[in-house]
Image (cartoon, rainbow, N blue to C red):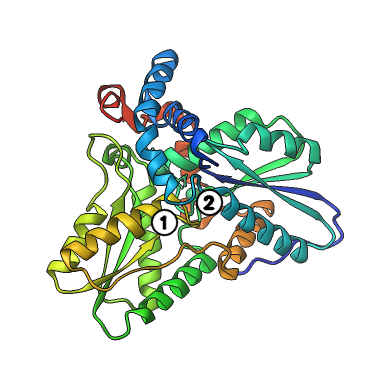
């Protein structure tokens, strides 16, 4: 769906806050990045000083193996450069759609620089009339969007009317971009039989039982892509499990083994990630690529993240315009945003990893 651009001539200053997770920019920042992640109350459910002590322990234990994985990408995460490209493309598009307004796109990472407080200061200095919080997570989760939004709300003290894009799991441009990258990957399979494996970052199952809409929104995205492409052989699976608790399943490695057992190859699609990073370039390409080779899942192909695909950037622009125009996202409930209303107040939800399980995460 394309949104009618704002009436021109309004001369407003519009700040778009692109929220993402962040990643270490070199070997020395791996440990503090992990510390910030595990010190998030949305991730570990312990009171302040105990959580901080545990986050220190887990980040120390995970530092070396994580550094080894980041070394496979040159030592640091490509997430910030990838997010910058998306920010530039979105800023250019919004300024062309609203030539009489001045739109600037800022990046607010949750766990590494530029962090949310740095973004908040930059937005404050811009003195905006409108501020749109726009997560680079198409599907809402308490562990990602809500955590970032909560911090943004606490941190930003500047001017402007604020609006929030909570989720866009079925946004037309997002689905079109997914269909394009999957279609290109399928062509590389030539005529060999392949299953499309939609691999999403997992979360603990108990969060979903408590009402986190993430799994339902992953399924909504996949349903839209499957319908658009007319896919017949496909499955949803979940990757990147952390800790001992039950996470959403089936796990992506099991789905790859199942494909091999069924005599088909795989096109793996990172359906919850919109940019390349450690969990696509290392986990999907290298780790699961080796597994696919071992179990005979051939061909093993991967659709790239949508990145700066013009349809995807168009979807981000549409969501921004809808937010400024005060349109509620219809998929979020009866005229109001259930994601935000129900989950943005993290105090009312449980953390991802409970006190009982947190000791064995490292
Ligand atoms: C849809 C996106 C994501 C969800 C949901 C999510 C939940 C989640 N993640 C962890 C723990 C880790 N995540 C790590 C890296 C990481 N996670 C996401 C996205 C989601 N996480 C991204 C984009 C990245 C990559 C950053 C980069 O540097 O490239 C890591 C660090 C890497 C590692 O050691 O594997 C951890 C740890 C939990 C516990 C969780 C929900 C409970
Ligand atoms: Fe939503
Ligand atoms: Fe993660």
Residue 240 locus on image (x, y percent): 32, 46
Q: Is residue 192 visible?
A: yes
Q: Secondary structure at mark 1?
A: helix
Placement of 170 over or under 202, stated as above or below: below
Is 171 displayed left or right of 317 in the figure?
Answer: left
Q: Quadrant of ligand 1?
A: top left
Label 1 sits on residue: 281
Q: Is 104 or 332 nearer to us in this picture?
A: 104
Q: What label does residue 78 carry, if any?
A: 2
Q: Secondary structure at mark 2?
A: loop
Give me the C-alpha separation between circle 2 and circle 1.
Answer: 10 Å
Is 35 displayed left or right of 128 in the figure?
Answer: left
Q: Residues within 10 Å of mark 2 (few under 14, many from 20)?
A: many
Q: Residue furthest top?
A: 49
Q: Is 188 or 133 nearer to us in this picture?
A: 188
Residue 59 locus on image (x, y percent): 40, 28
Give me the residue at 28% from left, 86% from top: 191
Quadrant where the N terminus sits is: bottom right
Is 262 displayed left or right of 139 in the figure?
Answer: left
Residue 206 locus on image (x, y percent): 27, 37
Give me the residue at 61% from left, 41% from top: 108
Q: Does mark 2's beta carbon lie closer than 8 Å to ligand 1?
A: yes
Residues at circles 2 and 1 in contact by the CB criterion of under 8 Å: yes
Give me the residue at 31% from left, 50% from top: 239
Quadrant where the C terminus sits is: top left
Q: Residues within 10 Å of mark 1 (few under 14, many from 20)?
A: some
Placement of 238 over or under 5, stated as above or below: above
Placement of 336 over or under 285, stated as above or below: above
């Amino acid at each position: 769906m394309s949104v009618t651009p704002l009436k021109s001539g309004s001369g407003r200053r519009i700040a778009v806050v692109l929220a993402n997770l962040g990643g270490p920019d070199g070997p020395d920042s791996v440990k503090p990045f992990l510390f910030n992640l595990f010190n998030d109350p949305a991730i570990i459910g312990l009171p302040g000083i105990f959580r901080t002590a545990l986050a220190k322990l887990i980040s120390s234990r995970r530092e070396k193996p994580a550094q080894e994985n980041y070394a496979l990408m040159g030592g640091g995460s490509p997430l910030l450069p990838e997010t910058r490209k998306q920010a530039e493309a979105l800023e250019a598009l919004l300024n062309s759609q609203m030539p009489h307004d001045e739109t600037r796109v800022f990046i607010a990472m949750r766990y590494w620089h530029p962090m949310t407080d740095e973004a908040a200061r930059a937005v404050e200095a811009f003195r905006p009339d409108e501020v749109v919080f726009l997560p680079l997570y198409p599907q809402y989760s308490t562990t990602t969007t809500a955590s970032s939004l909560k911090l943004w709300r606490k941190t930003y003290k500047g001017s402007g009317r604020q609006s929030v894009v909570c989720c866009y799991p079925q946004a037309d441009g997002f689905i079109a971009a997914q269909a394009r990258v999957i279609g290109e990957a399928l062509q590389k399979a030539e005529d060999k039989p392949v299953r499309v494996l939609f691999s999403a970052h997992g979360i603990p199952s108990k969060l979903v039982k408590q009402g986190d809409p993430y799994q339902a929104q992953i399924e909504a995205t996949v349903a839209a892509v499957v319908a658009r492409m007319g896919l017949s052989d496909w499955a949803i699976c979940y990757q990147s499990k952390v800790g001992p608790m039950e996470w959403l399943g089936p796990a992506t490695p099991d789905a790859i083994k199942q494909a091999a057992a069924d005599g088909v190859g795989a096109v793996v699609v990172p359906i919850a990630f919109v940019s390349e990073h450690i969990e696509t370039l290392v986990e999907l390409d290298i780790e699961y690529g080796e597994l696919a080779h071992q179990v005979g899942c051939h061909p093993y192909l991967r659709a790239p993240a949508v990145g700066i695909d013009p349809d995807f950037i168009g979807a981000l622009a549409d969501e921004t315009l809808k937010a400024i125009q005060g349109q509620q996202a219809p998929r979020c409930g009866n005229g109001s945003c259930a994601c935000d209303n129900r989950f943005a107040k993290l105090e009312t939800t449980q953390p991802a990893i409970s006190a009982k399980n947190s000791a064995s995460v490292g």
